[in-house]
Image (cartoon, helix red, strand yellow):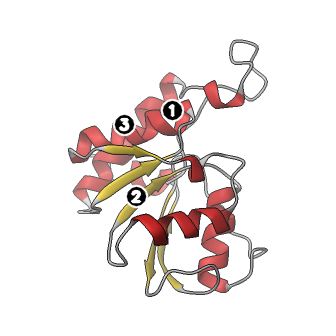
Amino acid sequence: MRHGIAAEHGDPRYPKDSDRPLTSEGEKKVKIISDAMKKLEISFDSILTSPYVRAAETAKIVAKTFKKEVTFSEELRAEQNSEHLVEMLRREYKQDASLLLVGHEPLLSHWISVLVSGNPHTEILMKKAGVCKLSVGNLHYGRCATLEWLLAPRHFLAIKD
């Protein structure tokens, strides 16, 4: 899951990119999306998030809906490398773990691209608050996953009632 709509990059109130929070619109949309995810019976065992404020806030909203704990992961920071993310997941989680990762672009789309196609340059578009589901057999850096679905926020917003 990509974080929701956040304060603009370069906003003088947040000199550090990592401090940019969700906007009120971003919070509302993430809450609606989280409720829609629950209605769709989307499930996961754990939530891992980037420590950046906007991702952490997104993860906490989802965690409240699903009654889950949030774990912070440096490997999900905006400037991280998708190979490090794979290494951390292999090291710290069981092969059959079902995880919701909350992070940033371009890391998420690059990671999805590598796992699904083996090519880091396959175009994947992760909208803010978009969610993607991958099924992974044996996690490694390279083609090892099947893309089950990729939903933009508008898909979730359509089922909010």
Question: Percent x, y for residue 57?
Answer: 45, 33
| Secondary-structure class at tag 1 | helix
- The amino acid beneath tag 3 is Lys
Q: First in sequence: mark 2 or mark 1?
A: 1
Figure check: 32 above or below 42:
above
Q: Earlier in the sequence, mark 2 or mark 3?
A: 3
Residue under numbered circle 3: 60
Residue 146 in view, yes or no = yes
Tell which tag, 1 or 3, sits nearer the viewer. 3
Left or right: 122 in relation to 50: right
Looking at the picture, tell me which residue is in the foreground, 63 or 123: 63
Q: Amino acid at mark 2?
A: Leu
- CB-based contact (under 8 Å), mark 1 and mark 3: no
> Which residue is denoted by mark 2 in the rendering?
100
* Count of marks overlaid on the render: 3
Q: Which residue does the numbered mark 1 point to in the structure image?
A: 26
CA neighbours of label 1 inside 10 A, class few (<14), some (14 to 19), many (20+)? many
Query: Is residue 158 in sight in this rendering?
Result: no
